[in-house]
Amino acid sequence: MNGRTDPPPIKEWRAEQTKLTAAKYAACERYYGLQDEVRSVEQLRKGAENIMREDTQERQPRRTQDIDR
């Protein structure tokens, strides 16, 4: 052997790097799509809460304090 080793498997490493890079970009695209979806759902939830809050305020009679005591 005389201290010689086999060369590193560069072709295999590059193939694995290409595969992992593609998977990374696919995961990023999915993440950004889900992030937009969550943002939209949060906006709808806040709107629904505002509508419910306004609806309950309209149903409850307003209490006034008697000034004449």
Image (spheres, rainbow, N blue to C red):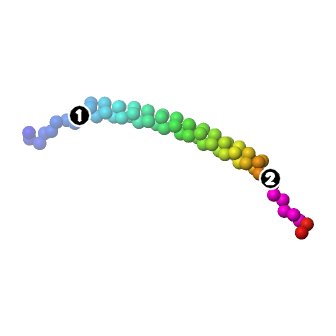
**Side (left or right) of 64 relative to 21:** right
Q: Earlier in the sequence, mark 1 or mark 2?
A: 1
Q: Amino acid at mark 1?
A: Pro
Residue placed farthest to the right in the image?
68
Helix, strand or loop under label 1: loop
Percent coordinates x, y for residue 36 in the rendering: 56, 37
Q: Residues within 10 Å of mark 2 (few under 14, many from 20)?
A: few
- Position of the C terminus by quadrant: bottom right
Judging by the rendered image, the residue that carries numbered circle 2 is 61
Q: Nearer the viewer, residue 60 or 19?
A: 60
Q: Which residues are magenta?
A: 61-67
**What's the distance in space between the residues labelled 1 and 2, CA to CA?**
78 Å
Residue placed farthest to the bottom in the image?
69
Percent coordinates x, y for residue 27 in the rendering: 44, 36
Q: Name the residue located 66 percent from the left edge and 45 percent from the top edge.
A: 49
Percent coordinates x, y for residue 13 in the rendering: 28, 34
Percent coordinates x, y for residue 66 in the rendering: 87, 63
Judging by the rendered image, the residue that carries numbered circle 1 is 9
Q: Residues within 10 Å of mark 1 (few under 14, many from 20)?
A: few
Question: Is label 1 in contact with label 2 (beta carbons under 8 Å)?
Answer: no
State whether the magenta stretch is mostly helix, strand or loop. Answer: loop
In the rendered image, the vertical position of residue 59 relative to residue 32, given as above or below: below
**Side (left or right) of 40 relative to 14:** right
